[in-house]
Image: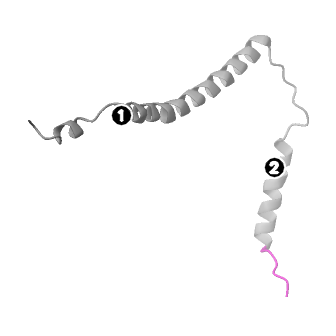
Amino acid sequence: MKPTQHPTRRNAFTVVLGIGIAILPATAQAYVGPGAGLTAIGTMVALFAALILALVGFVWYPVKRLMRTAKAPTKASERTEPRE
C-alpha cells in the first residue's frame, strides 16, 4: 500500500504555496541610482577587506610571534651552563 498524506496537511501546503506564489512579483520595477550603487559597492569592498584583515590578524600575528620567540635565545639555556 502506498502511504498517503493527511488531507489537512495537503490543504495547508496548497494554501502556503498559493500565498507564496501570489506575493511574488512578476518583474522587479526598481532603479538603483549612482549614489546608492556606489554605496553598495563600497560596502561590499569594505566587508571583503574586513574579512581578509581579520583572517590576517588571526593567522599572521600568532605566526609572527612564534617566529620571534624561535629566533630569540632562551635564558633557560644560559642558566644551565656551569658557573666558573
Q: Is residue 68 left or right of residue 42?
A: left
Q: Tell whether label 2 touches label 1 (CB within 8 Å).
A: no
Quadrant for the C terminus in the image: top left
The mark that comes first in sequence, 1 or 2, is 2
Vertical placement of residue 3 versus 47, above or below = below
Q: Nearer the viewer, residue 53 or 8?
A: 53
Where is residue 47? Give x, y as percent.
Answer: 62, 26
Where is residue 49? Give x, y as percent.
Answer: 61, 24
* Colouring rule applied to residues: one colour
**CA neighbours of label 2 inside 10 A, class few (<14), some (14 to 19), many (20+):** few
The amino acid type found where label 2 is placed reads: Ile
The amino acid type found where label 1 is placed reads: Thr
Checking the image for residue 27, the label placed there is: none
Q: Residue 45's quadrant in the figure? A: top right
**Residue on which disc 2 sits:** 19
Q: CA distance from mark 1 to mark 2?
A: 64 Å
Residue extent of the magenta highlight: 1-6
Vertical placement of residue 26 versus 13, above or below = above
Vertical placement of residue 3 versus 73, above or below = below
Quadrant for the N terminus in the image: bottom right
Q: Residue 53's quadrant in the figure? A: top right
Q: What residue is drawn where x is 68% and y is 25%?
A: 44
Q: What residue is drawn where x is 77% and y is 69%?
A: 8
**Residue on which disc 1 sits:** 69
